[in-house]
Amino acid sequence: DQQVKQNSPSLSVQEGRISILNCDYTNSMFDYFLWYKKYPAEGPTFLISISSIKDKNEDGRFTVFLNKSAKHLSLHIVPSQPGDSAVYFCAASALGAGSYQLTFGKGTKLSVIP
Amino acid sequence: DGGITQSPKYLFRKEGQNVTLSCEQNLNHDAMYWYRQDPGQGLRLIYYSQIVNDFQKGDIAEGYSVSREKKESFPLTVTSAQKNPTAFYLCASISGGAGDQPQHFGDGTRLSIL
């Protein structure tokens, strides 16, 4: 049973427009949510996170919104750039067995068209 | 520069053979993790270690083994018992125990069956 779901395997956006990547979760015990960006044949790199007690966090062109009642979060990228083309993973963090563990979604492949 | 080094980048295994994937970090991080990524899938946790000489099974530990004799090193052995070892393997580490601390990833090892 997937606890973190990214229902859109891919997304295409024109350069300069907004990219919105969505993520849903089922476990109410998640404390933090993180977004990672991954290029082919490389490891994921951390983008931005949000605590479950907040509803928005912003860092430059990246903003994450959390709707706790709907168990939904989204990553907004404005403006989108060709270098943003990558796979984006949503991850949720919960305390288990003495340490925080990450549960990942399956990822959304973003293509930014010049 | 501090980081996580995984080697080799590509690895081939014959049927019935054990292979070991290397993961070294110079970030002075306490916790280290091994994930497996299959095409179109998220990252799934194989094993993790919070301190030296201690490690716990993740969600898909069967057919894998690890050791943590040094803080800097967390090698993963894919045994012959792992019937479907072809995948992209990622090692990660983290310094603290807070849930919003991002994990730092290596660039991965792609394992294939000959």
Image: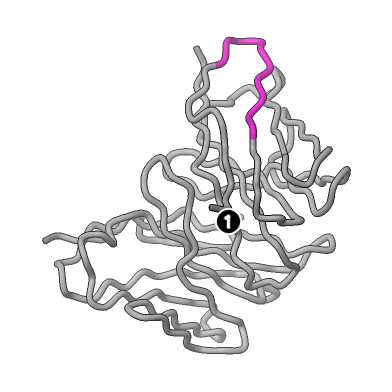
Which residue is the extreme one toward the right? Answer: B53
Which residue is the extreme one toward the front? Answer: B1
Colour treatment of the image: one colour
**Nearer-the-camera pick, B105 or B5:** B5
Would residue A100 be counted in the magenta stretch?
A: no
* Residue A112 image position (x, y, % from top left): 20, 61
Residue A31: image quadrant is bottom right
List the residue tagged with mark 1.
Answer: B104
Amino acid on which the number 1 mark rests in the picture: His
* Vertical placement of residue B56 versus A82, above or below: above
Q: Is residue A96 left or right of residue B5?
A: right
Subunit under mark 1:
B
* Residue A20 image position (x, y, % from top left): 32, 73
* Vertical placement of residue B54 versus A65, above or below: above
Q: At 65% across and 46% down in the image, what residue appears? A: B25
Pick the quarter of the image with the N terminus of chain A. bottom right
Pick the quarter of the image with the C terminus of chain A. bottom left
* Residue B23 image position (x, y, % from top left): 64, 38
Residue B96: image quadrant is bottom right
Give the magenta range.
B13-22
